[in-house]
């Protein structure tokens, strides 16, 4: 179930706005499609990123997938816990499996993302 | 990521079981096969620690009969078929006249016949090759579509199969086979597998497959048995350093490069490819198959470059995350003389790695059973 209070993208990222920052991660639907996640490249802290750019890559046993930045800004933090335990993305995608924190450059970009209900519709089909 | 469309492809007799069990079905060389059910990492660990059940019915089986079947076979495959007593099983290769590997296969000596078990990807190619190259009084029958194959693998597999088998499977030695009734169905059982764990492969009629499958799941419930998909089958064999046709082996490589001279008996008499293989062995190959582990985080993948001394020297042929070792591992080819310290180019990064002897994983129950048996015999 997509969590209420979060925003979502078509490419299966979620966003939680905390003040001027956006915490981002992969949705439950995405982690289910990927299977067991065994590795994630740490997003570069300090990196300036535009919405739609590749934020980082995540790997399951069988595949390598790109994660896209849902918003533009500066990567101010990355989840170091995923170095030791990338499976947190599978087991707790909205909590301990968070991937990066981006300092928002343009808050209005959030308006273009989906609500939980809209994302549920998307993944139901 | 898009949602999965209904998979096309041939189905084994157990397809409905896999769907019912929630498998993620993928196309594998034209077959709709389970990649995983619960997840590759969990299924891998289950096989190492307890027991798992694989459907490998997509593989090909050919039966050879006739007075010249043995002689024909010994000309076509690289291992010494003539050494097989009834019931024994042997890993072998089929090579072309240039010594290039056409397939790896199991050869079974059964009462009145020989059975070849070949990779699903090579069924048609292998059948045509065998038919073209047998001699004299040799009859070749393709029984692939009349044969289902289930593999139970893991340290608890002897206990589990023992509960539903009418024979004493515990005493079946490694690489031996026997006719066994399982859950009331006639089967051929061999103590073989592709995981490095103790286990059995069970051949039966397609109509009996569901019963055998279900009986094993029920008998193994107390041991935690689950169905296991092709994803874990690959990580398990990779940890053992077992070559996979299409990755480590193909027609451009001989047994010399692939490190498979141990199943190539150059002294048994002539066989197809023998001359080239013997010459390559004499001269020395220009590349050799090695196993490696990454020394930093990452997952090596097929076709990534192996670097030594700052220069690209070869390619990864198989790579993955190893659930047992908790690191990236792989197989690949490097020129002889390359030292153990290498690097692997993974997308934008150059990751340090180390060539290690095979198998990469050394705690498998096949090894442990053989060590136990050996120490028992020396203790006498």
Image: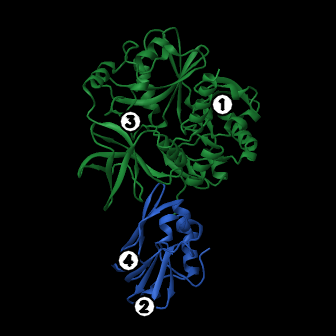
User: Which of these two is toward me, B177 or B337?
Assistant: B337
- Indicate the secondary structure of the residue bearing disc 3: loop
Query: What chain is tagged by disc 3?
Result: B
Examine the image and state in which quarter residue B186 appears.
Answer: top right
Residue at 53 percent across and 16 percent down: it is B84
Which of discs 3 and 4 lies nearer the camera? The answer is 4
- Label 1: chain letter: B
Q: Secondary structure at mark 1?
A: loop
User: In this rendering, do the residues under marks 1 and 2 share a single chain?
Assistant: no
Chain ID, blue in image? A
Rounded to the nearest whole Å, what is the CA distance between mark 1 and mark 2?
Answer: 64 Å
First reached walking from the N terminus: tag 1 or tag 3: 1
Quick check: marks 1 and 3 in contact, CB under 8 Å? Answer: no
Q: Which mark is residue A45?
A: 4
Label 4: chain letter: A
The residue that appears at 42% across and 55% down in the rendered structure is B299
Q: Residues within 10 Å of mark 2 (few under 14, many from 20)?
A: few
């Amino acid at each position: 179930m997509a969590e209420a209070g979060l925003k979502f993208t078509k490419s299966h990222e979620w966003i939680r706005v905390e003040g001027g920052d956006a915490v981002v991660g992969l949705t439950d639907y995405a982690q289910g499609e990927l299977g067991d996640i065994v590795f994630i490249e740490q997003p570069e802290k300090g990196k300036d990123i535009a919405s739609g750019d590749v934020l980082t890559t995540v790997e399951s046993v069988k595949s390598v997938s790109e994660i896209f930045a849902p918003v533009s800004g500066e990567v101010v933090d990355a989840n170091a816990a995923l170095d030791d335990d990338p499976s947190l993305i599978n087991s707790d995608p909205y909590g301990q499996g968070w991937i990066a924190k981006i300092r928002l450059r343009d808050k209005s970009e959030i308006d273009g993302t989906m609500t939980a209900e809209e994302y549920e519709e998307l993944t139901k089909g | 990521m898009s949602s999965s469309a209904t998979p096309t492809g041939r189905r084994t007799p157990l397809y409905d079981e896999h769907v019912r069990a929630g498998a993620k079905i993928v196309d594998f060389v034209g077959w709709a096969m389970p990649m995983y059910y619960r997840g590759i990492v969990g299924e891998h660990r289950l096989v190492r620690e307890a027991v798992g059940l694989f459907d490998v019915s997509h593989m090909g089986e050919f039966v050879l009969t006739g007075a010249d079947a043995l002689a024909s076979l010994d000309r076509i495959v690289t291992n010494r078929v003539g050494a097989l007593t009834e019931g024994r099983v042997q890993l072998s290769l089929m090579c072309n006249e240039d010594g290039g590997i056409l397939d790896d296969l199991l050869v079974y000596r059964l009462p009145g016949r020989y059975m070849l078990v070949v990779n699903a990807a090579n069924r048609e190619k292998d059948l045509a090759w065998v038919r073209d190259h047998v001699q004299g009084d040799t009859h070749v029958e393709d029984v692939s579509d009349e044969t289902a194959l289930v593999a139970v693998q893991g340290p608890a597999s002897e206990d589990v199969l023992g509960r539903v088998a009418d024979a004493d499977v515990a005493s079946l030695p490694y690489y031996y086979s026997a006719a066994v009734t399982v859950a009331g169905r006639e089967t051929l059982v061999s103590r073989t597998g592709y995981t490095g764990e103790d286990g059995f492969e069970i051949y039966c009629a397609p109509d009996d497959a569901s019963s055998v499958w279900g009986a094993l799941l029920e008998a193994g419930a107390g041991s935690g048995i689950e169905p296991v998909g092709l994803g874990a089958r690959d990580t398990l064999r990779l940890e053992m350093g077992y070559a996979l046709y299409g990755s480590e082996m193909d027609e451009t490589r001989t047994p010399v490069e692939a490190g498979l001279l141990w199943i190539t008996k150059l002294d048994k008499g002539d066989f197809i490819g023998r001359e080239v293989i013997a010459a390559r062995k004499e001269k020395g190959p220009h590349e050799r198959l090695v196993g490696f582990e990454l020394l930093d985080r990452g997952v090596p993948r097929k076709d990534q470059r192996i670097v030594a001394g700052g220069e690209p020297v070869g390619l990864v042929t198989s790579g993955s995350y190893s659930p047992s070792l908790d690191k990236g591992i792989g197989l690949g080819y490097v020129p002889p003389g390359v030292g153990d310290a290498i690097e692997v180019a993974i997308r934008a990064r150059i990751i340090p790695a180390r060539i290690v002897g095979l198998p990469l994983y050394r705690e498998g129950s096949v090894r442990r059973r053989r060590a136990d048996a050996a120490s028992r015999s020396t203790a006498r």
